[in-house]
Image (cartoon, rainbow, N blue to C red):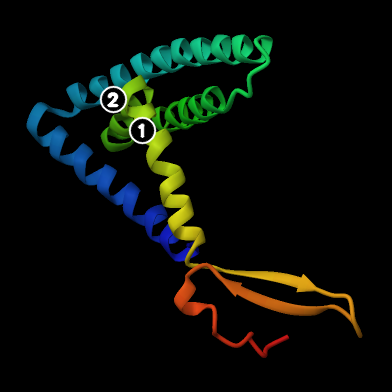
Amino acid sequence: MVAVLVVLFFLVPLAELAVIIAVGKSVGVLATLLLLLVFSLSGAWLAKRQGLAAWRRFQLATAEGRVPTREVADGAMILLAGALLLVPGFLTDLLGLVLLLPPCRALARRWVPALARRGASRRARITVVGPGSGPSTKVTWGRPELDDRPPDPRP
C-alpha cells in the first residue's frame, strides 16, 4: 500500500506536467493557464454547491432519524473532489469534476466498498484468544485457502 502511494506521489505530478506541456504546445501557454484557472474556479463553485446540497441531505436524514451513510459518503467524495480541484492540473481537475457528478458518486459508492472488501480479504487478521495459561495469538486469514497457514513465529 505504501509503495502504491509513493508511486502515485511521483507518477501523478509527472503525468500532470506532461499533459500541461502537451496542452500548452497545442493551445499556447496563456490559454493553458486560463483553462487551468477556469477549471479550478468552476470546479470550486460546483464543489461548494454540491457540498451544500449534501449537507442539507445529511441534516434531513438525521432529522428523519435515519443513519446518513449515503450522505456521509457523498460528502467525503465531494471533499475529495474539492481537494483534487485545488491541485493544478488537468487530470486531477477531470477526476475532481467526475466525482462531483451525482451518477458517478453513486457508482463510486457501490465500487469502493467492494474494493475495500477485496483488499481486506488479502490481509491477515490477528486475534488474541484466551483465557487459559495466558492469552495467545491466533492468525485468521481472509481467504479460506490460507486458513491453514501457521502463525508467524516472529514476535
Task: Pick the residue in front: 126 or 2.
Answer: 126
* Residue at the extreme right: 133
Query: In the image, 57: left or right of 115?
Result: right
Task: Pick the residue in front: 63 or 28.
Answer: 63
Residue 152 circle label: none
* Residue at the extreme bottom: 153
Instruction: Tell me if residue 112 can be seen.
Output: yes
Question: What secondary structure is found at the residue carrying circle 1?
Answer: loop
Q: Residue at x 49, y 10 (%)?
A: 53
Query: In the image, 47: left or right of 139?
Result: left
Q: Residue at x 63, y 86 (%)?
A: 152
Query: In the image, 42: left or right of 76?
Result: left
Q: Quadrant of residue 94?
A: top left
Q: Residue at x 10, y 36 (%)?
A: 25
Task: Answer whether labels 2 and 1 touch (C-beta < 8 Å).
Answer: yes
Quarter of the image where the C terminus is located: bottom right
Residue receiving disc 2: 36
Residue 88 circle label: 1
> Residue 127 at what x, y percent from top left?
72, 70
